[in-house]
Each structure stands twice: as C-alpha cells, then as structure tokens.
Amino acid sequence: MNLKRQLLLVSLLTLLLPWAGCQFIRETESALRAGQQQFLAGTARAIADSMAQYPEAFPLSRASDYLVGDQLYGHALDTRPELDGYFDDWGLEREALREIRGADGPVRFAIGLVEQSLYLYVEVTDRNVVYAGPATGSAADVAEIADRVSLVSTSPPYLEETLVFATEAPGSVVTTVKNADGTSPEPAVQAFWQDGPRGYQLEARIPVSRLGTHLGIVVDHAADKLAAAVRSASFSTRTPGAFVSTSAEITEIAESLVQPGMRLIVTDALGWRVANVGAIDRPMRESGGAGAAWLRIAYDALVESGQEADLAAPDAGGRERQGYIAQALDGLESSSWFRSSDSGRAVVAVAQPIQVRNATIGAVILQQGTEAILSLTNQGLARLMNVTMIATLLVASSLLGYATWLSRRIRRLSLAAEEALERDDLGMALPSASATDEVGDLSRSFSNVLRQLGDYNAYLRSLASKLSHELRTPLAIVTSSLENLEHEPLNEAAADYAERAKEGANRLRRILTAMSEASRVEELMARAEPEDFDLCTVLRSTIAAYQDA
C-alpha cells in the first residue's frame, strides 16, 4: 500500500469526531429531558395539592359504595349525534366502544354526554334477531320474549328502575320503564333500532335527570319466541357500579391550572378520566427533504427509545391504565416518556397522586412535548455533521496533498540515486540533502552510501594494478625456475609436473595481463574477448593435478 493510501486511511480517523460529538449531544438531550421531567413533576405536584383542596369534587369522597360493581363511563361529546343507529357521528374512535360477551358474539357499547342528555349506543352481534310481535300482549310481555337492550339505573340504597328497548321492527323504539310501580312507556326517552349485517345497533337519548347514580347495560338474546333469553350484562354484581363521567367542576379547576403546551388529565381513584384539558404542542414541520430524513435517522440512533407516542394519548375507553399512572394511583410519584418511531415526536409524562388524609382519591397526569429539545438536538446534530464533513474533507485533502508532496520528494531521491549509479557519478549531490526532516536525513544517508560505494569502486580499480604488480615478480621467478628446470635431466613424471606448472604460470600471466588492461572489474567482464581453447587439454591437466594432490 503506497503512502497516499496509508495517509488517506489515517484521515478516516477524523470520523471519531462525529462519534464524540454524538455522545455529547446524546448526554445533552438526556439532561434536557431530565430537567423538563423534573419541571413537570414539580408542576404536577402543585396541581395535585390544589386538587386536594376540593375532595368533594371526586366521586370517591361522595359515596362509600363508589367501588361496588363494574362501572360505565360517559364520554363528553362535542355535538349531539343523530339518532339513526350509527356510531360514525359520535366523534369518538372505535376503540371507545367497550365490549362484553354476548350469546352470538361480542356486544359493544358506548355512552356519551352532551347538554344534559345521555346518549347510549349498543352494537349487538345476533345471528337471528327476534322482534317483539303485536300479538304478544302488553309491553311487559314484549320485554320478555324479544331481543332487547336494558339500561339499569339505580340510586342506592333505594331507587331502582330499568329502561327497556325492544321493537317490532327496525326504526324508532318505544321505550318502557320498569320500577317498583310497574311497567309503563317512557316518552322522554328516544331510541332508534337499526339492523346490521351481523345483528343490530341501538342508539338512544335519555335525559340525565331520568337516571340514577349507578348505571348498567343488560342485553337479552332470544333465540326464538318460545325459548328463554340469554342475558349479557356490563356488571357482575347485584347492582351496577357508579356511573363515571367528566366532571365539570374538576375540569374548570384543571383549566385554571394547566399551562399552554401541556395536557392535563385528572383521574379518579380507579383511573377513570374525570378531566382532560390542554393540548400538547404539535411537532414543528420538518424541512430540508433528504437532509431532514438523514437527520431523523441519526436522531433515532442517538436518542434512547421510549414507548410509542400514541400511548401517551388519553385512553379511548376513558380509563387510564398506563403503568406510570397505576403507580400514581398506588400513591407513588412516577414518570414516563414516549417517542413516535415515525415522526420522532416525543412526550414527557409525569403522574402525581391526589391524596387527602393519606388516602389517594385520584391522580394528576401532566404531559408535555419535547419539540424544543428535538429542535435543539436536530440543530446541533446538523451543525455537527456539517462541521465534521468539512473537517474530514479538509483533513483528507491536506493529508493527500502532503502525501503527494512527500512521495514526490522520495521519488526524486530514488531516481537521483539510480541515475548516480548508472552514470558512475557517485559523488553527485542528491535532492533534499539540505532538508532538516527525515527525507533530508535519508538523502544524506544515501549520499554517504554512494560515497562509500565510490571509494570501494576506486579501491577495486586500483586493486587490479596492485595485484598485477605484486604478482608479476614471484610469477617471473617461478617461470624462470621452470625454464631452468627444463635443462636439467628429469624423469618422465617430473617432466609432466614441470610442464603442468609451466602451463599454470602461463594462465596466471594472461590473467594478470587482462586485469592490468581493465580499469575496472566491470569493464574487465564487459570487454573480455571470446577466445577459443581446447577444453579437453584443460580438463586433462586439471584431472591430473587433482590425482597427484
């Protein structure tokens, strides 16, 4: 891997900067949210203390039998629904319908309140709707042998009466009332019966003044006009539970205490919502297109996940059952936070018990959005990403430029050294020799190596002449001695020895002559002329010499 790529990889270490910045942003977001949560907790505590000054406004303090039986909840309606047997004009979600088990399937119902009128909607699953027949006799008989819906109204411990809704055909219903005085029509109550694909729907309007404090719904399913009806009820005790609805008094108190941008929910001791005022600020509209998208991805990776933001909304059924609210109803201050996985919207919620003489009579739930924190975090994250990107590009460009300059200096030094060797100019000045950095040190080291190599080559050049001079004298002595030996009487073996010695001396003389003719060892090898010789003669001489050794 070349120097440029190495330094480019080193430049990637600048990516540690956004990581460190993201950790800082995450800690900052957590600290801001914790501060907001503490502020909400203090505000909720003050509101709970104010609510505790009005214990008579909470149902639990008004009736000792409040907790007896299953309770019905009345939703506050914005407008009067039209009595047509349909639920779509109530302004409530389908989740607001409560459900009980029926003979042929679920029975769903809801109760609404508007302008001193109670609206009842019942949706019954019934495979065979049995209508009342005109030949069956009195209104009391009709109630016994037909499918019917009853609203049981009591005011413990004395008054109890039942409103019965049964009809001969879909359309308007003549309501009858049963009490201790008997059974009679109730003209003040209006109702409408509508057939549906799975059964029937009933919608009724009842004056609140006609009802007691405890309400319950009973659905009787008649398989036919002869069989006994199967009963389904919203309560399992002898009398129904107390009716719960939004309290005008508590709502008025809550409206005077809630601050803008906050949602205040007040519940009774069982979690039923008795007041819901204020609204959480809507999240600011994001802009920036793709930029906002990657900011959202980065924000989701940074911020710890919470529960889905939709769970912070008031319960559609009217009873708040969130875990942090349950803790408040147990007398403990608690908190939670919610965040939407789609929009990133976050909500901080705190719950504070309302206590009177160490008894919990309700709870205050205060919620506020974290749009300001989200905006600050997004702005900080955007600035961090922009600065980091610019810094990374600058560092990478600087390192790449530096690597190019440095590699060019090293390349020039390498080429100069190769040129000095090729031109046999080992004393030439190399580039960057005067530099004070490591490349300058390397250039000076190369110069020293080349200078020593030049000295060594000079020594080799002079070595040939020195050897030639030093060896010629003893070689001349050996040669003359061998020539003189030829004039002496020698046996055959001695003559062979003398001949081989003379041949060796002649070869040595030729070598010395060739060495003296060359100024350098390299030139000696390069300029050597090819010469034909008898290889067999050389081999025989060599073999004979080794045999005699």
Image: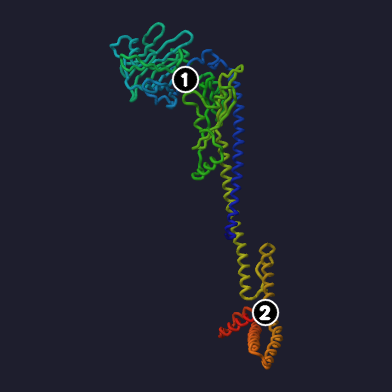
Quadrant containing the N terminus in the rendered view: bottom right
- Say which of 43 and 14 sits in front: 14
For the question of whether residue 67 can be seen, the reply is yes
Q: Residue furthest left?
A: 135
Structural distance between the alpha carbons of marks 1 and 2: 116 Å
Query: Residue at coordinates 43% horizontally, 20% vertically from top-left?
Result: 111
Q: Residues within 10 Å of mark 2 (few under 14, many from 20)?
A: some
Residue, disc 1: 73
Looking at the rendered image, the disc whose residue lies closer to the viewer, 1 or 2, is 2
Number of on-image labels: 2
**Amino acid at dot 2:** Arg
Q: Secondary structure at mark 1?
A: strand
Residue 135 lies in quadrant: top left
Q: Earlier in the sequence, mark 1 or mark 2?
A: 1
Q: Quadrant of residue 448?
A: bottom right
Quadrant showing the C terminus: bottom right
> What secondary structure is found at the residue carrying circle 2?
helix
x, y percentage for residue 45? 61, 24
Foreground: 297 or 549? 549
Please identify the residue farthest to the top as the structure is shown.
181
Of 513 and 390, the residue lying toward us? 513
Q: What amino acid is labelled 1 in the image?
A: Tyr
Q: Position of residue 270 (x, y in %)?
A: 52, 20
For residue 461, the mark is 2
